[in-house]
Image: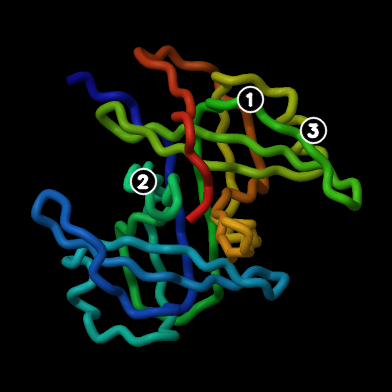
Amino acid sequence: MRQSPADLNRIQLHGRLEECPSFSHVNHDVEFYRFPLCVSRLSGAEDRVYVVAPRALLEPISDLEKEEEVTVQGEVRTFNNRSGTGSRLVISVFARTFVREQGRDENRLQLSGTLCKEPSVRATPLGRTICDMILAVNRRYGRADYLPCITWGSLARRCGAMSVGERVRLEGRLQSRVYTKMVEGRQEARTAFEVSVMSLDSEESRESGAELYLPAGLSPEI
């Protein structure tokens, strides 16, 4: 199998454990654990980001407690949930390093990838311009993560003029957003995850053996 080039996918988080790590799943005989990490923004609002880590990474600090501060470095991953239960697109951070330490809250994400869906420009009730995009970020061996991204103001207008297939490199943060949705006549609280883009640059197109498009039915809800 030909190995496809991997795109840039790097995130660093510093925040507080909202819950202690709990067992998530087993993959290739490796146990994985999952926990929510709360990261404060400069505005005072908090993002609640889910982190997945292999057991071996957590064993040296197995006495972790709720509200402890930790730093996580890793990658943003997406999973297409076909079980029919919960979100169709699950977004989390796959931890590569994990350190218990105090410090300033941090949520810094760097990505490169390919626009795989036509950008959608809209306006808030107050007239601010927003652009929604889906970025396909290659892993190796033909896999990719599909990340919903949002830009604002003049950057949103610029992104709205981009086309499917364009290569971009961006910096931003992975943020959570709570909203309500009517389900069978009642309101349910849902959480959406998206990349809030701070800066973006176009990259030169590169040749690839496969085109990347967003699979039908994916949604940034969990």
Residue 18 to residue 143: above or below: below
Q: Of marks 1 and 2, which one's residue comes earlier in the chain?
A: 2
User: Mark 2: which amino acid?
Assistant: Asn
Q: Position of residue 141 (x, y in %)?
A: 25, 28
SS class, disc 3 = helix
Mark 1 → mark 2, Cα distance in angstroms: 23 Å
**Numbered label attached to residue 132:** none
SS class, disc 2 = loop
User: Mark 3: which amino acid?
Assistant: Arg
Mark 2 → mark 3, Cα distance in angstroms: 32 Å
Quadrant in the picture for residue 169: top right
Residue at 49%, 74% (x, y): give it. Answer: 15
Quadrant in the picture for residue 43: bottom right
Quadrant in the picture for residue 154: top right
Q: Position of residue 175 (x, y in %)?
A: 58, 58
The residue that disc 3 covers is 157
